[in-house]
Amino acid sequence: MQFDTKTVNKLLEIDESYKAPERMLQLMLDDQKRPEVFKKFLEVSTDLKFDWFHEYFEDEQAERKSKKQDFTPDSIATLLNSLVDSDKSNGHYFEVAAGTGGILIKRWWDDCTNDRVGNPLHADSNLKFLSIFTYDPRSYWYQVEEMSDRAIPFLLFNMAIRGMNGVAIQCDALSRKAKDV
């Protein structure tokens, strides 16, 4: 795994994993340090099509007992995205209980590589490659919700480093009580 506990802790400049969510949030809110931390992470990997924190968060941060947090495997994330809104032509995406963004990232990657909004020729397999030229983040809106104080900073990181146009709301999906936006 490229982003194991040791690597992530080193990139975040922390000595204990329990400090990661607070440190990540500090970095995401700091206009000077945010680009620097993005560069550090991108030096480790430039592959943005999956959630870098999947295993790290699952091993170190998930609140399985108190909040019943678990992760959606990549294959299930791909399946869910193909089942839900198979047209995907309106550019809108909504997800509750987003965690660190695994399913969201799969959808974003699909939008980038199969631009159904900006590339009118996306259905033609010979011209599908044009999506790399037609994809415009402004044409897509991603709205996600997550309750966990530990997951939100990683979700924000995942959205920001990919340049997603959207909002992350910290709330309870059942009661609709929001903590932060």
Image (cartoon, rainbow, N blue to C red):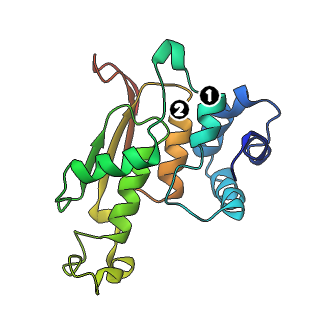
The residue drawn where x is 40% and y is 54% is: 106
Pick the front one: 146 or 2: 2
Question: Can residue 17 be seen at all in this image of the molecule?
Answer: yes
Relative to 134, say whether 172 is above or below.
above
Q: Is residue 137 visible?
A: no
Residue 151 is labelled as 2
Q: Residue furthest top?
A: 66
The residue at which mark 1 appears reads as 61
Q: CA distance from mark 1 to mark 2?
A: 8 Å
User: Is the C terminus in the top left, top right, bottom left or bottom right quadrant?
Assistant: top left
Name the one closer to the observer, 36 or 16: 16
Q: Nearer the viewer, mark 1 or mark 2?
A: 1
Badge 2 marks a residue whose secondary structure is loop
Residue 36 lies, in percent from the top left, at: 70, 57
In x, y percent, where is residue 104? 39, 48
Amino acid on which the number 1 mark rests in the picture: Gln
Q: Residue furthest right?
A: 15
Residue sitting at x 68%, y 51%:
33
Residue for point 28% across, 21% down? 176
| Coordinates of residue 113 in the picture (x, y in percent) | 37, 70
Indicate the secondary structure of the residue bearing disc 1.
loop
What is the number of callouts on the image?
A: 2
- The type of residue carrying mark 2 is Ala
The mark that comes first in sequence, 1 or 2, is: 1
Neighbours of disc 2 within 10 Å: few (<14), some (14-19), many (20+): many
The percent position of residue 141, horizontal first and vertical second, equals: 29, 53
Do the residues bearing badges 1 and 2 touch, measured as CB atoms within 8 Å?
yes
The reply, left or right, for residue 167 in relation to residue 12 is left
Tell me if residue 79 comes above or below residue 133 in the rendering: above
